[in-house]
């Protein structure tokens, strides 16, 4: 790889620089590229330095994971580096010989780096969103190549974190909160901004009556007191969103009309139904900040700043951010909330631009926010609307982050967009966090496909079903009888042979894979844009990190089983978008494999203990096994029936 650099001043005057970039060889075949330039005048806040990247040799195809909106990323596929979108936060490419390469931009102490295609090729764009800086120094990006793209990506992240020396860990060193090991429900799509105590309690009673083991409820937008809502009407979703985004938070207390006895009373009643409770709020209090006439403003005014468009929001400085969130979270915790979801996180450019360099701002406000979340909720938080790289690289300890745009119920076109965002974003974000694939409905037209995705996602599982519309039969394959989800071990990601291909045009099935204990799991979908049939193959080798040489391969919907060697492949054809498959790959040792309770998607996770053909299940159900190439059933902790 060859690199050359230039700087750009505030007047957008491009200047060549000498020794403006340094390339360092790191362990495990990773290279690190550092910016090191000084300008006679202030650098442009939006494009302070450019580094041209020459990826030598022929590249066949790539996937660019780029920020397509303020808050979210999605994949772009191509063959021409000049077409790579701006704000690309990770690039993975494949050469004709099968070798993969990864280029991973970072956010350093001051500068943010992203990739973009230009007429001359691939460029790394460094910017600070801050005026007056005359130096551009620090780590810009890391890169590497190898046969295993997942290993290369992991080595890139670990190398970058070491070089940045921020003290922030990768996902493997983040603790997954216990509350998210259980099935949940969120009020958003069910009730939207008219969520009420009456409605929440009715939904809790429905879960009890239907024997659906939901264990927590999240009160989402907007449970709190917002005066602009009073008397407001809206005809459709768009008008509702417009109302939200012109409204301010009046009080930390719940809306007195929809929660007449207060937030604590509602949470106490929900707990009487056997559910724990979490609370949603955005970083800004509410979408347009805090109402300067309100009780909340009076409590935290010393920790706020006023934006250029007149919003009153938390200051980004760590001490003030902490005090703002502490005041809010003190109240929520006293009311009985046990976890938090914080929205609207990727807003540095919108609200704090020009106040300090982007890296400094992101670290400061995340440190303040996470200090309060750790103090009040033991780090049980879902980060949301926060896929910008300044957020991804700068959260100290919180373990979970959303990885897609909002779920859209009763919308089949949305499913393609959703699965592509979640799976490809997880290839990147999943190195840092467990990935939240968002809420969903158990009774819309995509319910079973969505349930499969949540089952293999490796993250939280929670529905947003309206009152009366939860389907136990859709949720049962995901959980044990006590509501504990059968969670895979890491974020689900595309298989390597899908990683750089556009599944909407490739003519091949789209495959998403994960690990569950010593077994693998793979879901296959037809995402063809014209709904044509697709053809391909599956193999135990499709599952990253799966160990073993011989496997029992079980398909959930047909109940068919085959014995395959590690590299063997079997054909897979899916006629249209309504056909999909779910495969287990279980080590087959001495002509035996224990699958588990095959009424569950992630069946191996139903096994508590196994030694040879002696099996102990978590629940009093038989274990389906494969013996001498055929299915059989073993009673828990006993021999064959």
Image (cartoon, grey):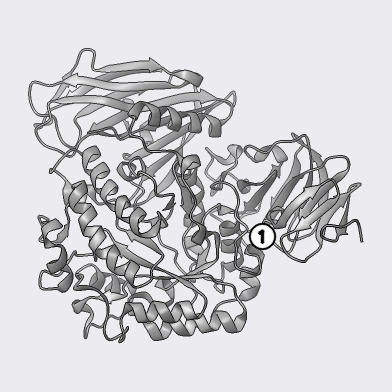
216 to 55, vertically: above or below? below
- Report whether residue 383 is seen: yes
Up-down: is 594 above or below 587? below
Image quadrant holding the N terminus, namely: top left
Work out which quarter of the rendered image holds the C terminus and state it. bottom right
The residue most toward the top is: 18
**Helix, strand, or loop for circle 1?**
loop
Residue 570 picture quarter: top right
Question: Residue 270: x, y in percent?
Answer: 45, 78
| Residue corresponding to mark 1 | 579
Q: Would you call the spot at circle 1 few (<14 residues within 10 Å), some (14-19), or many (20 or more)?
A: some
Q: Is residue 176 above or below residue 86?
A: below
Expressed as whole percent of the image width and height from the top left, the position of residue 550 reads 80, 38
Left or right, 171 with reference to 445: left
Q: Is residue 589 left or right of residue 444?
A: right
Residue at the image position 54 percent from the left and 83 percent from the top: 206
Q: Visible in this render: residue 304?
A: no
Quarter where residue 162 is shown = top left
Q: Nearer the viewer, residue 66 or 202?
A: 202
Residue 444, given in percent of the width and then of the height, sits at: 54, 72
Pick the residue in front: 503 or 377.
377
Task: State whether residue 151 is above or below residue 212.
Answer: above
Residue 486 location (% of width, % of height): 63, 58
Residue nearest the observer in this picture, 314 or 416: 314
Tell me if 218 is positioned left or right of 287 in this view: right
Is 273 placed left or right of 319 in the picture?
Answer: right
Counting the numbered discs, the total is: 1
């Amino acid at each position: 790889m060859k690199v050359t650099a230039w700087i750009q001043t505030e007047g957008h005057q491009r200047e060549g620089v000498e020794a403006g970039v340094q390339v360092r060889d790191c362990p495990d075949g990773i290279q690190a590229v550092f910016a090191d330039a000084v300008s006679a005048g202030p650098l442009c806040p939006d494009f302070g330095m450019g580094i041209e990247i020459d990826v030598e040799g022929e590249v066949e195809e790539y996937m660019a994971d780029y920020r397509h909106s303020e808050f979210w990323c999605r994949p772009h596929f191509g063959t021409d580096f000049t077409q790579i979108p701006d704000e690309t936060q990770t690039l993975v490419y494949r050469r004709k010989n099968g070798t993969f390469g990864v280029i991973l931009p970072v956010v350093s102490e001051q500068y943010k780096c992203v990739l973009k295609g230009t007429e001359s090729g691939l460029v790394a764009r460094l910017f600070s969103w801050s005026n007056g800086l005359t130096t551009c120094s620090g780590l810009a990006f890391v890169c590497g190549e190898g046969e295993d793209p997942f290993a290369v990506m992991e080595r890139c992240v670990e190398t970058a974190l070491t070089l940045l020396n921020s003290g922030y860990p990768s996902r493997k060193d983040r603790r997954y909160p216990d509350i998210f090991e259980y099935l949940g429900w969120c009020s958003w799509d069910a009730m939207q901004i008219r969520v009420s105590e009456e409605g929440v309690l009715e939904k809790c009673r429905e879960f009890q009556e239907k024997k659906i083991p939901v264990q927590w409820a999240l009160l989402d937008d907007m449970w709190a007191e917002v005066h602009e809502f009073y008397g407001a009407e809206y005809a459709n979703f768009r008008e509702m969103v417009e109302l939200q985004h012109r409204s301010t938070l009046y009080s930390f207390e719940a809306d007195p009309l929809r929660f007449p006895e207060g937030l604590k009373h509602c949470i106490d009643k929900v707990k009487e139904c056997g559910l724990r409770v979490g609370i949603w709020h955005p970083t800004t209090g509410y979408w347009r900040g805090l109402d300067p006439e309100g009780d909340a403003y009076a409590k935290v005014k010393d920790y706020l700043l006023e934006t250029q468009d007149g919003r009153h929001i938390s200051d980004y400085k760590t001490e003030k951010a902490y005090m703002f969130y502490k005041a809010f979270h003190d109240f929520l915790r006293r009311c009985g909330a046990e976890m938090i979801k914080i929205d609207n996180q990727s807003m540095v450019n919108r609200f704090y631009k020009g106040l300090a360099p982007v890296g400094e701002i992101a670290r400061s406000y995340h440190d303040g926010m996470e200090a309060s979340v750790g103090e009040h909720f033991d780090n049980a938080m879902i980060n949301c609307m926060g896929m910008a790289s300044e957020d991804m690289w700068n959260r100290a300890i919180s373990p979970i982050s959303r990885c897609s745009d909002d779920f859209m119920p009763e919308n089949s076109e949305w499913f393609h967009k959703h699965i592509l965002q979640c799976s490809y974003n997880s290839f990147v974000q999943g190195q840092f966090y467990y990935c939240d694939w968002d809420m969903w409905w158990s009774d819309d037209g995509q319910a079973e496909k969505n349930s499969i995705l949540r089952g293999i996602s490796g993250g939280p599982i929670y529905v947003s079903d309206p009152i009366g519309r939860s389907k136990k039969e859709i949720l049962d394959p995901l959980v044990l009888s006590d509501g504990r989800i059968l969670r895979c071990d890491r974020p689900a990601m595309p298989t390597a042979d899908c990683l750089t291909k556009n599944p909407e045009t490739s003519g091949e099935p789209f495959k998403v894979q994960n690990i569950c204990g010593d077994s693998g799991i793979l879901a296959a979908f037809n995402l063809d844009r014209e709904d044509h049939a697709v053809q391909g193959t599956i193999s135990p080798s499709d599952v990253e990190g799966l160990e073993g040489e011989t496997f029992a391969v079980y398909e959930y919907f047909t109940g068919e089983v085959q014995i395959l060697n590690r590299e063997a492949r079997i054909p897979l054809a899916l006629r249209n978008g309504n056909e999909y498959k779910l495969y287990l790959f279980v080590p087959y040792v001495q002509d035996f494999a224990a699958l588990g309770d095959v009424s569950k998607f992630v069946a191996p996770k139903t096994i508590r203990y196994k030694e040879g053909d002696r099996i102990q299940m978590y629940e009093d159900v038989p274990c389906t096994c494969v013996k001498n190439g055929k299915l059989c059933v073993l009673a828990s902790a006993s021999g064959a029936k």
